[in-house]
C-alpha cells in the first residue's frame, strides 16, 4: 500500500465509524459496505502502524502489568 496521508487517514477513520453499524458477522464478505469497511480499515491500519507503532514491551513492563 502506498504511503497514507493524514487526510486519507482521517477520511478512512470517519468512514469506518459510519460503516461499523452497517456491517456485522452475518454480512456477506462481498457486500459493498463490508468491502468498503475492509479497504478503509486497511488504510487506518497502515497509517497507524507508521505513525503510532506499538513497540514490544520490556521485561520490566511485563512484570509491572503482571503484578510482580
Image: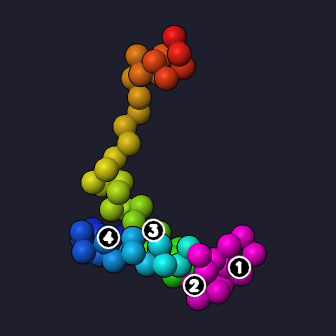
Vertical arrangement, residue 19 with respect to residue 61, above or below: below
For residue 27, side relative to residue 37 (left or right): right
Q: Which of the labelled discs sits on residue 58, or is there none?
A: none
Identity of the residue furthest to the left in this view: 6
> Magenta includes 28?
yes
Q: Earlier in the sequence, mark 4 or mark 2?
A: 4
The reply to whether residue 36 is visible in this rendering is yes
Q: Which of the labelled discs sits on residue 42, or is there none?
A: 3
Majority secondary structure in the magenta region: loop
The residue tagged with tag 4: helix, strand or loop?
Answer: helix
The stretch of residues the image draws in magenta is 21-33
Front position in the image: 15 or 4: 15
Q: Earlier in the sequence, mark 3 or mark 1?
A: 1
Applied colour scheme: rainbow
For disc 3, the neighbor class at 10 Å (few under 14, some 14 to 19, many from 20) is some
Determine whether label 4 and label 2 are within 8 Å by CB. no
Task: Identify the residue position indicated by label 4 in the image.
Answer: 9
For residue 29, side relative to residue 15 (left or right): right
Determine whether label 2 and label 1 are within 8 Å by CB. yes
Q: Earlier in the sequence, mark 4 or mark 1?
A: 4
Determine whether label 3 and label 1 are within 8 Å by CB. no
For residue 65, side relative to residue 26 (left or right): left
Task: Identify the residue position indicated by label 1 in the image.
Answer: 27
Vertical arrangement, residue 58 with respect to residue 27, above or below: above
Q: Earlier in the sequence, mark 2 or mark 1?
A: 1
The residue tagged with tag 3: helix, strand or loop?
Answer: helix
Amino acid at each position: 500500500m502506498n504511503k497514507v496521508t493524514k487526510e486519507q487517514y482521517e477520511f478512512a477513520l470517519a468512514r469506518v465509524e459510519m460503516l461499523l453499524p452497517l456491517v456485522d458477522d452475518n454480512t456477506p464478505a462481498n457486500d459493498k459496505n463490508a468491502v468498503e469497511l475492509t479497504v478503509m480499515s486497511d488504510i487506518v491500519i497502515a497509517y497507524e502502524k507508521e505513525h503510532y507503532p506499538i513497540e514490544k514491551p520490556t521485561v520490566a513492563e511485563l512484570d509491572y502489568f503482571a503484578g510482580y
